[in-house]
Amino acid sequence: MADVLVAPSILSADFAKLGEEIGAITRAGADMIHVDVMDGHFVPNLTIGPMVIKALRPHSALPFDVHLMIAPVDPLLAAFREAGADIITIHPEASPHPHRTLQAIKACGARAGISLNPGTPLAALDYLLDGLDLVLVMSVNPGFGGQSFISSQLRKIEAVRQRIDAHGGEIILEVDGGVNAQTVRQVIDAGATALVAGTAVFTGGPACYASNIARLKQPPEAV
């Protein structure tokens, strides 16, 4: 099996030097840059907006994987795309018409993703897979970094994997939340093809980023 993609979450980076941090994880072997956008309304935290993403864009040629935890989401799609988002992932709860929102993401030239919170049923994917490039399964409740993995989400990852395989096409199955050396093998075995990791990548500083990423890409086999 090919290595999974690793998308370090800059939520765990040193915000005083984000540009340097993004350059460091790019050189360390990251595959994407995961950007968590929170509005203090849809989720209980407030992070960054398009202006910061635009300022960070010159620091890496890797795809910017932008996870919008904001509501309403539709009015800001174009701004995030113009700022440099390559993949824009939204929550179905954040739009009255998620199918239309996915169309709008594609129309502005980005790849489109849907994120499923721990309590979001699998049925949220019904009739949307044709318009998706990525499904993000949240294995923590969104809003904060450093949370513990919710093990019940392994069943959801497996179920999403089955749906994607039955549908066909190239859809990334990404998992975000509590992904670390202890949980990564279970997540990969459940069917994930991309891993969002914050603490597990940024712990130890730039000298450790390459080994941290390599450990996630090629974890030991389950005993």
Image (cartoon, helix red, strand yellow):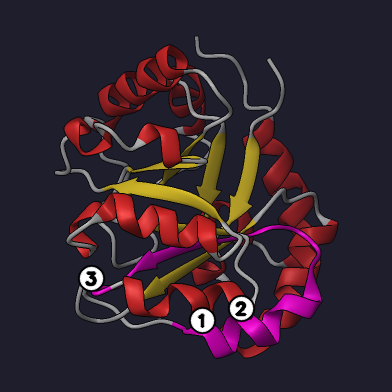
Foreground label between 1 and 3: 1
Residue 77 pos. (x, y %):
44, 72
Q: Residue at x 79, y 49 (%)?
A: 29
| SS under mark 3 | loop
Q: Amino acid at mark 1?
A: Ala
Foreground label between 2 and 3: 2
Identify residue for label 2. 82
Residue 134 pos. (x, y %):
49, 41
Start and end of the magenta stretch? Answer: 48-72
Identify residue for label 3. 43
Visible in this render: residue 198? no
| SS under mark 2 | helix
The furthest residue to the top: 223
Residue 34 pos. (x, y %):
56, 60
Identify residue for label 1. 79
Disc 2 and disc 1 in contact, CB within 8 angstroms: yes
Left/right placement of residue 167 relative to residue 115 reads: right
Q: Residue at x 42, y 73 (%)?
A: 37
Q: Amino acid at mark 2?
A: Glu
Magenta span includes 71 = yes
- Distance from Cα at disc 2 to Cα at disc 1: 5 Å
